Image: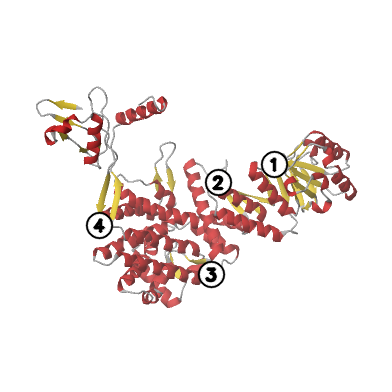
Amino acid sequence: PSTTSQQHQVKVVGRLSNKTLTLRSDHLPKASMRLSFTNLVAAAVVVSSATAFVPIQKGGRPSIVSLDAKRVSFKEESRRKLVEGINQVANAVKVTLGPKGRNVVLERNYGAPEIVNDGVTIAREISLKDPEENVGARLIQEVAAKSDSKAGDGTTTSTIMTQAIVNNGMRAVTAGISPVALNRGIRKAANMVSAKIKELAKPVDGIDDLRNVATIASGSIEMGRIIAQAADKVGETGSTVVEESQTLFDEIEFTEGLTIDRGYISPYFVKDQERQIAELVNPKVLVTDAKIDNVNDVVPLLEQLVKTKDPLLIIAEDVTGEALSALVVNKMRGVLDVVAIKAPGFGNRRREYTQDIAIATGASFVAEELGITLDSVTLDMLGTADRIVVAKESTTIVTDGKHQDEIDARIAQLRREAETADTDFDRDKCTERIASLGGGIARIKVGAATETELKDKKLRYEDALNSVRSARELGVVPGGGACLAHIQDFFEEEVLDAMDNDDERQGARILFQAMGAPAMQVAENAGIEGAVILAKIQQMCQDNGFGWGWDAATMEFCDLIERGILDPAKVTINAIDNSASVAGLVLTTECLVTEIPIEMTEEEKQRLFDQQAMGAGMGPGIAG
């Protein structure tokens, strides 16, 4: 510590939030002048608990460390910053809504910029310089992400609704209405509106409705046709995946049955030399997790199959040694029609896949831990299939439909596992297994002239696929914001009567005011005054009944259901629920805590990086 003889000043430097503690010797009793340095440090800490003490380095120079400080803003200022952040994200996203919505260009640090029309992708890319405004941006990104994860579409509608509720709600809070009661009123109204949408929704009726939903979600008639074809072919339990193609055109491929990414163990199993495949008709299926290397283990079973002349597919961990030699010899001599493949997957996942195959074919899963050994297997323990095609690197099992109840039970179990999965990877694997068991996979191969167009088309396909799944789940409602406009006009009085007090009623009114925002934005993006179109839609609903609205593509008022302009009910419900949830919480905000950003030059950043790298390289103990 530095001591000056004239002032007898002892200075202990410790810094937190720009505070420095100084003890002067003339302020202390004389006896305390004899305090050791250690006691003096302790005294400094006791005097101010808000001060972080940093020991003085040898050589007389003080070491000063500043911990990250926070900015705290209150009341109107905190809410105003949140709203500014929400508005900036919403204004960027809402230009994409409707058939005449525009695109947004996203800069990339590496590679070409992306030109996208997808609300959640745009929202995720936005990060604002002001930390307080950035909190608002993060909140509205949460709305878009929730809508994307639950329904897969409707992210732009959710964002527009959130912006409208927050802006209308802020005026009410400023006027002195209780924010807590407002939030309660918004939540109650949102629940009642969601229930009403479920009532109004009509079930999907055939491939035409699926095509209409996909066309509206993707903004392309051709994309809508391909997705409807895929969804119709694979059914409700099948899966449709989007892949990149090397061509300029979009193509679709179907894989029927249960597909395994494993081929024959030995090329001697091939029956069709030209196509290099082995096809088994009405075969028996042996499913085991054991490694087969001793021929004596399978001889009893093979002798029974020679008598019945049934083809056999063996799915095992591996088939090697004399067991493989015996199978190949018998195959080539025509004594036995047999093919062996390795079980798909690795570790625990391999066991799950083999159990799926056993359930799909009706086979007993042969495992020593279940008390079943290979030499005890009988014909009634083998599974059956309609047809099995084994290629070099893949196997397709077309089931015979005899075990549909067990397959349905397994699919229901896998769906529960997918809902509770911890990671996206596990969830995707469950979805793949459901698709394999359920009847097949459709692969949409997307082609485009440039990488930018390819990415945009893939996002559109994924949105449309998610919309089709949502439509199957809860049905469809008129699109273009017409459903919400109808509810806003016809259902408001009923909801207001259900509220407990005037403040809650004001919250419900705020939600209902926001429900006209999507229809108005569709009109604004088409170059028409939104309020005029909204009033006309509501008038048409009064005159002609539910389902009438405005077709922004042709600029006509018509029956939207008849014309095929449909939205999935689930997407609309999620937009209401998610926007009401986040907007209501923003209105109840009274304090906002954010970090104060530290602006550093490139040289300072490099110096800090070098210091951290050196500290990490030294290891513990050396730096001290």
Give how far apart the Cα atoms at labels 1 and 4 are: 63 Å
Q: Secondary structure under badge 2?
A: helix
If the image is split into quadrants, where does the N terminus sit?
top left
Residue at 42% across / 71% down in the picture? 487
Look at the numbered discs 2 and 1 and tell me whether their residues touch, using CB distance below 8 Å: no
Give how far apart the Cα atoms at labels 2 and 1 are: 20 Å
Q: Nearer the viewer, mark 1 or mark 3?
A: 1
Kind of residue sitting beneath label 3: Lys
Along the polypeptide, which appears first: circle 2 or circle 3?
Answer: 3
Residue position marked by numbered label 1 in the rendering: 262
Above or below, 378 relative to 180: above
Along the polypeptide, which appears first: circle 4 or circle 3?
Answer: 4
**Any mark on residue 425, and which?**
2
Give the farthest residue toward the front: 31
Residue position marked by numbered label 4 in the rendering: 75
Query: Is residue 151 among what the camera can see?
Result: no
Q: Nearer the viewer, mark 4 or mark 2?
A: 4
